[in-house]
Each structure stands twice: as C-alpha cells, then as structure tokens.
Image (cartoon, grey):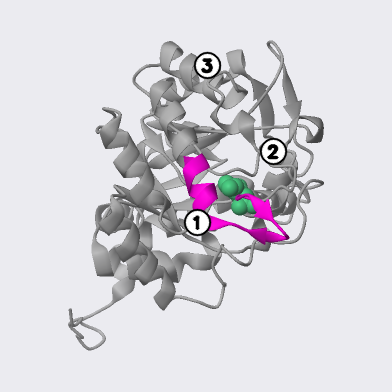
C-alpha cells in the first residue's frame, strides 16, 4: 500500500490528533481484556501465596488460589490463564517422572481452574524444566540435551494435561518434532479438539531470569539453553519454524520474548496470517516494574503502551503478568 502524500497545508496530520474523540476515532490498534493470557505460578499448600522477589506484584499461588484467580479472570473478561508449576530442587529428578503425574500441582491446578471457571481457557506449559534435576527442558545424557527421548516424555505430559481438561497445550521446549508427535497422540487418544499453542520462535534469552526464580529452576539450571532455543540474531529461522509447526499441527504460534522481538511478530503475521501470540516475559515485567517502583516510569502508562505495541506488531494476544491489572484498567 502506498500512502497518499498531500502537500502542506492541505495535509495537516495534527488535525486528527486534536481531541481525544478524534484520536479515538482514528486509532488503528486497541487493547481489550480479551487480548490477554494470564500466566500463573502454582505451588504446594493450602490457601496461601508466596511473593516472587524478582517479580514484584506476582506470587506463587496454591491450587485453591489458582481456582480463585480463574474466577477473577472470568470476571475481568480475560479469556485464558496459563499454569506453571514451582518445584523445589529436592523434588527434581533426572527421569522427570513427576512431569506426567496426573496429580502433580500443575495438573491439579488445571482441574481446579476448569471446575471453578469452566468458561476460562486453560493453557499449559510442556517442557521438562520444572521437574528436571538439571533445570533443562529436555533429558540430559552425557552433557547433551537429547531430542527424541525428550519428545516421548513431552507426549506423555501432553496427554495427561489434555485428560485433566486443558484447552490449549503450550510446548515450550523447542525440541524438533514435538508438535507432530503431540498432535498425533492427541488424535489417537480422542483429544482432537485440544489446541496447540506452540512456543515456536522461542529465543535463548536473558529475559527469562525472574521466571526461573519463580519456578525454582535458577539454582537447578546447569549450563544454558542455546542448543535448542533460538539465537537472538536470527529472524528467517523463525519463519522456517512457524512453517514447520503449522505443518505438524500447531493451531497458534508464539513468539517469545516479546518487546525485543516485535520484528519477528510482524514478519510471522505478514507471512502466515495465523493466530499469533507474544509472551511479554518475566524479565520484561521485572524491568518495567522496577523502573516504575523507582519512580522512573509511569507503571500504568508503560504497561498499556507496551501491550499496545504487541497488537500493533500483528499479535492477536499477549501472555502477560500485567493481565489482571491491565484488564482492570481497560474496564474488564
Ligand atoms: C520453560 C519456560 C520458560 C518460560 C516459559 N516456559 C523459561 C525458560 O525457557 O528457561 C519463560 C517465561 C518468562 O520468562 O516469563 N520451558
């Protein structure tokens, strides 16, 4: 599309910026509570929560409180929540068996949320890092992350999560072939209506630091994730990954992190036109929150501005820790 260029003074672009009414009328991108997926951290215990120091304002919730948060999401008009379990180092094992235990806290939280607020979609995370003694997303053999054995474990996780009532599965592990394997297993088990929101373009990012505190993985993590998560220098590779994940059966695509990867969002949306989400990750939340706590930024304004940027870049929705606050500000 070629913009029409009219000469000054015929074109005074400030005319339409003059009043709030005119600005509202020509605004190209708007935000609504229905744009958000709210990530929640779940931990063991009853009717309690533990603040996460590197994410001020965010806490780990016990299962009963996740159910309460699901109801809150419903009241605010937030269509979906996403569940992440906290696992202490003492409960982590090399075989990651807890990952597909139907009674692990993540799976209990899925059931509790669906029971409390059936209309709210529940998304899960599929990766071994919350359960792995090495903090890695895949099994480690001789210091290497092994792909195919990991995919078999991810499939087991996926089936149990679907059985517990999850609406959208979120493989965040970046192993090759996991989308196809999970999709085939879901079909075979009669879960053909369970959606896959693939963490397709997930970068090896330093912005995940606070999240790893939140799920208890920081101390556990040996090495880094650069042999499976994407190199921050790459962009064409993201398109190859999207093409592959769609071909393997993904319904929705995610780019992660968010603010530093808006160019990737735009390219994916333009090239494929499929449902696209960005994850405004823990480090982005921590960064904006810390600056606001220091009085250096206006919290509400940067929150809404950053979330609007995702929509403008082509995203249909955003996973964000700001979800309840932003929804409230937007009148949810
Ligand atoms: C783990 C996972 C991570 C996040 C979501 N799922 C961390 C990682 O890959 O190390 C990060 C989310 C955030 O930082 O908010 N598979």
Q: Give the range drawn in magenta.
A: 137-154
Locate residue 159 relative to residue 326 in the image: left or right.
left
Please give the residue where the numbered disc 3 appears in the rendered image. 67
Please give the residue where the numbered disc 2 appears in the rendered image. 215
Locate residue 82 relative to residue 205 in the image: left or right.
left
User: Of helix, strand and loop, which one carries label 3?
Assistant: helix
85 shown above or below 213: above
Mark 2 Cα-neighbour bin, 10 Å: few <14, some 14–19, many ≥20: many
Q: Nearer the viewer, mark 2 or mark 3?
A: 2
Locate residue 249 relative to residue 81 in the image: left or right.
left
Q: In which quarter of the image is the N terminus?
A: bottom left
Instruction: Name the residue nearer the viewer: 321 or 301.
Output: 321
3D distance between C-alphas at marks 2 and 3 = 19 Å
Residue 185 quadrant: top left
Instruction: Name the residue nearer the viewer: 17 or 264.
Output: 264
Please give the residue where the numbered disc 1 appears in the rendered image. 175
Badge 2 or badge 3: first in the primary sequence: 3
Is residue 75 visible in the rendered structure shown here?
A: yes
Residue 248 placement (x, y as % from top left)? 30, 54
Residue 332 quadrant: top left
Q: Which of marks 3 and 1 is in front?
A: 1
3D distance between C-alphas at marks 2 and 1 = 20 Å
């Amino acid at each position: 599309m070629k913009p029409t260029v009219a000469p000054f003074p015929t074109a005074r672009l400030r005319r339409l910026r003059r009043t709030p009414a005119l600005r509202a009328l020509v605004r190209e991108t708007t935000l609504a509570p229905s744009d958000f997926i709210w990530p929640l951290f779940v931990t063991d215990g009853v009717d309690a929560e533990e603040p996460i120091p590197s994410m001020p304002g965010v806490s780990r919730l016990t299962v009963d409180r996740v159910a309460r948060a699901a109801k809150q999401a419903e009241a605010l008009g937030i269509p979906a929540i996403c569940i992440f379990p906290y696992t202490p180092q003492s409960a982590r094992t090399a075989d990651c068996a807890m990952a597909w235990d139907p009674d692990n806290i993540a799976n209990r939280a899925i059931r509790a949320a669906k029971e409390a607020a059936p209309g709210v979609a529940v998304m899960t995370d599929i990766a071994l890092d919350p359960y792995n003694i090495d903090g890695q997303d895949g099994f480690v053999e001789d210091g290497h992350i092994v792909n195919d054995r990991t995919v078999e474990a991810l499939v087991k996780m996926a089936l149990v999560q679907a059985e517990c009532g999850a609406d959208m599965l979120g493989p965040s592990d970046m192993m090759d072939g996991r989308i196809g394997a999970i999709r085939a297993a879901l079909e075979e088990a009669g879960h053909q209506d369970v959606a896959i929101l693939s963490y397709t373009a997930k970068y090896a990012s330093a912005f995940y630091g606070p999240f790893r505190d939140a799920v208890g993985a920081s101390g556990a993590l040996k090495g880094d994730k650069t042999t499976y998560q994407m190199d921050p220098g790459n962009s064409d590779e993201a398109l190859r990954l999207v093409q592959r994940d769609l071909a393997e059966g993904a319904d929705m695509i995610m780019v992660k992190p968010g603010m530093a990867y808006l160019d990737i969002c735009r390219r994916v949306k333009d090239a494929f036109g499929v449902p696209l989400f960005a994850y405004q990750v823990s480090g982005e939340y921590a960064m904006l929150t810390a600056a606001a706590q220091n009085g250096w930024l206006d919290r509400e304004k940067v929150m809404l501005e950053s979330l609007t940027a995702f929509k403008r870049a082509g995203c249909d929705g955003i996973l964000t820790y700001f979800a309840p606050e932003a929804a409230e500000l937007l009148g949810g």
